[in-house]
Structure formats: C-alpha cells, structure tokens
Amino acid sequence: MKNLIAILLSALLALSLSACSTPPPPPDAPLENTYWKLMEIGGRPAQVFHNQREAHFVLQKARKGVGGSSGCNRLTGSYTLEGAQLRFGPMAGTRMACLQGAEQERLFLETLPEVARWHITGNRLDLLDAQGAVLASFEARYMP
C-alpha cells in the first residue's frame, strides 16, 4: 500500500511539474510580408513623434519592394535577399518637413544602405552591417 501511495504521489508531482513548464518559444516571424516597427537604432530607443507615423518597413515579396515610413515621410524602394544577406536598393520618399524626429529619420535612411545581413529571433529583427554589428532592431507587428 505504501508503494502504491508513493507511486501515485510521484505521478502527481510529475504531472504538476510538467504543467508548470514554460511553453515553447513562438516561431520566428517571416522577414518578408511582415510589418517591422523600428524599436532601436544607433544604440538608442526609437521614438514616435507627435502627428507622425512610427518608423517601419515591409518587404513586399511579390514585387521585391520596400514600403514604409521613416517617421515623418513615406518611403519606397527595392531590396535583394539571398539567404541571410539583405541589401536595400535606392529609396525614394516624400519630402515633408517635420518639426520633430529629423535626426532619427536621417539615421534611419542612412542605415538602410549599410545593411548587409539580417537575423530574426521570435518577433525581433536585427539588421546587421557586414561585420555583424547590429545597426537597428525592429519588432514584428501583426495587423488584425
């Protein structure tokens, strides 16, 4: 009888421990056709300024095009993707003058041509230079 009770207690303990285990991490977001919100650039947190869009981009797989916003202005362009290598082509954008965020916008636009590689973990995208240093970090946003 003591052995049966010990076995039952061991089974209950195993069940309770397995119920408390951490869930598996979410799958990595896809690079293309995902809305990537700028979270950090140049080692500083990104900001969203009054009456401006958040800086973001979407790599549109079907047309190999980039669409998004550098904060104050809309942007569009092209990209090439080969495995972990990513290159942004020339970007075009609107030319609105905004009172805030000019420095972040300038840095965002200057960073894109420096991108050589990318890395995704979960919902975080890091854009890297040729030496592997993180230039900017983004977070996947999903639209309902």
Image: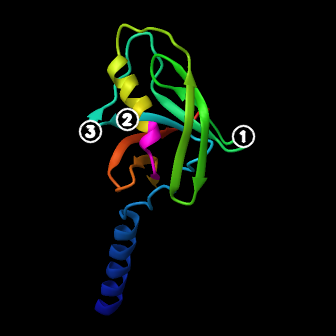
Percent position (x, y) of residue 112?
46, 38
At 48% from the left and 55% from the top, the residue drawn is 26
Quadrant occupied by the N terminus: bottom left
Residue 121 appears in the figure: no
* Residue 44, quarter of the rendered image: top left
* 113 to 8, vertically: above or below: above
Q: CA distance from mark 2 to mark 3?
A: 10 Å
Q: Which residues are magenta?
A: 112-117
Model colouring:
rainbow
Kindly identify which numbered label has been placed on residue 39: 2
Badge 3 element:
loop
**Residue at image mark 1:** 63
Q: Which residue in the structure is indicated by mark 3? A: 43
Side of 116 relative to 134 (left or right): right
Residue 114 highlighted magenta (yes or no): yes
N-terminal of the pair, mark 3 or mark 1, is 3
Q: Farthest residue in the front direction?
A: 90
Amino acid on which disc 3 is placed: Gly
Relative height, residue 54 to residue 26 (above, below): above
Is residue 20 covered in magenta? no
Q: Amino acid at mark 2?
A: Met
